[in-house]
Image (cartoon, grey):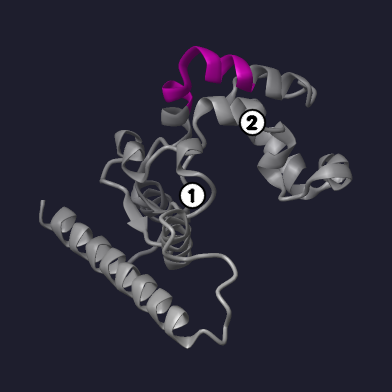
């Protein structure tokens, strides 16, 4: 078999792009309200001020100028301004441009409040194949514990010595948790058959 740079280029350019661990996109109001510097770092507060000196920021600076159609010499201040303009006028067009050529995305939707993020299947309109959800079991557990507490089935301050109360709470939690996991598996099986 003969190998050439042209053949390699063809394979790379035609191979489906699958993002195998992503997170849901923020909805435009939350995206517009967040500090744009956080796109390349998890830093907050005073540490965020150092972000422009890091390689990830420098690379993003170049890529965002290209994405937004800005000149190569546009300064950093022009980038978030253009991003706000594009998000405000047609957020879907910007998302489509960013995800162009993506076959599918495996989305871990277990971060933050669901109301701040687009649901995992919302992303389907930007990919060639339906996106899939990565079920984050610790988020399911946290949601169940919060619901049990809200409905008075997980009172704060259960004495650990009160074995009966602890056992009942554990049974309520584990029953709900198992049901949620089984439901997630069944939904996934139904989606794969569709």
Q: Residues within 10 Å of mark 2 (few under 14, many from 20)?
A: some
Q: Find residue 182 and report its image quarter.
A: bottom left
Tag 2 or tag 1, which sits nearer the N-term? 1
x 81%, y 48%: residue: 54
Which quadrant would the N terminus be assigned to in this image?
Answer: bottom left
- Of residue 58 and residue 157, the one placed in the foreground of this image is 157
* Tag 1 secondary structure: loop
Q: Which mark is residue 23?
A: 1
67 versus 141 height, above or below: above
x 43%, y 84%: residue: 164
Q: Find residue 20 and report its image quarter.
A: bottom left
- Of residue 78 and residue 141, the one placed in the foreground of this image is 141
Alpha-carbon span between mark 1 and mark 2:
19 Å
Question: Which residue is denoted by mark 2 in the rendering?
Answer: 64
Q: For this view, does 32 lie left or right of residue 94?
A: right
x 57%, y 65%: residue: 156
Label 1 with label 2: CB-CB less than 8 Å: no
Would residue 65 be seen by someone viewing this image from the given angle? yes
Q: In the image, is residue 161 part of the stretch drawn in magenta?
A: no
Q: Position of residue 35 (x, y in %)?
A: 72, 33
- Of residue 189 and residue 76, the one placed in the foreground of this image is 189
Would residue 71 be seen by someone viewing this image from the given angle? no
Q: Which mark is residue 93?
A: none
Q: Position of residue 115 (x, y in %)?
A: 46, 37
Q: Position of residue 90 (x, y in %)?
A: 46, 16
What are the residue bounds of the magenta stretch? 83-94
Q: In the image, is residue 87 part of the stretch drawn in magenta?
A: yes
x 46%, y 53%: residue: 150
């Amino acid at each position: 078999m003969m190998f050439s740079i042209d053949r390699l280029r063809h394979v790379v350019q035609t191979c489906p792009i699958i993002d195998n661990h992503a997170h849901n996109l923020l909805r435009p109001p939350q995206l517009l309200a967040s500090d744009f510097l956080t796109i390349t770092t998890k830093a907050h507060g005073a540490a965020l001020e150092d972000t422009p000196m890091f390689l990830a920021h420098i690379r993003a600076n170049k890529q965002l100028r290209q994405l937004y159609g800005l000149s190569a010499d546009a300064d950093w201040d022009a980038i978030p301004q253009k991003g706000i303009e594009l998000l405000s006028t047609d957020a879907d067009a910007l998302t489509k441009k960013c995800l162009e050529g993506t076959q599918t995305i495996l989305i871990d939707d277990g971060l933050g409040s669901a109301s701040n993020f687009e649901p995992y299947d919302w992303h389907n309109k930007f990919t060639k194949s339906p996106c899939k959800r990565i079920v984050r079991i610790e988020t399911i557990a946290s949601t169940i514990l919060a619901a049990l507490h809200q409905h008075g089935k997980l009172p704060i301050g259960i004495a650990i010595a009160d074995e009966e109360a602890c056992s009942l709470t554990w049974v309520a939690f584990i029953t709900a948790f198992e049901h949620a996991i089984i439901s997630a598996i069944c939904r996934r099986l139904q989606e794969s058959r569709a």
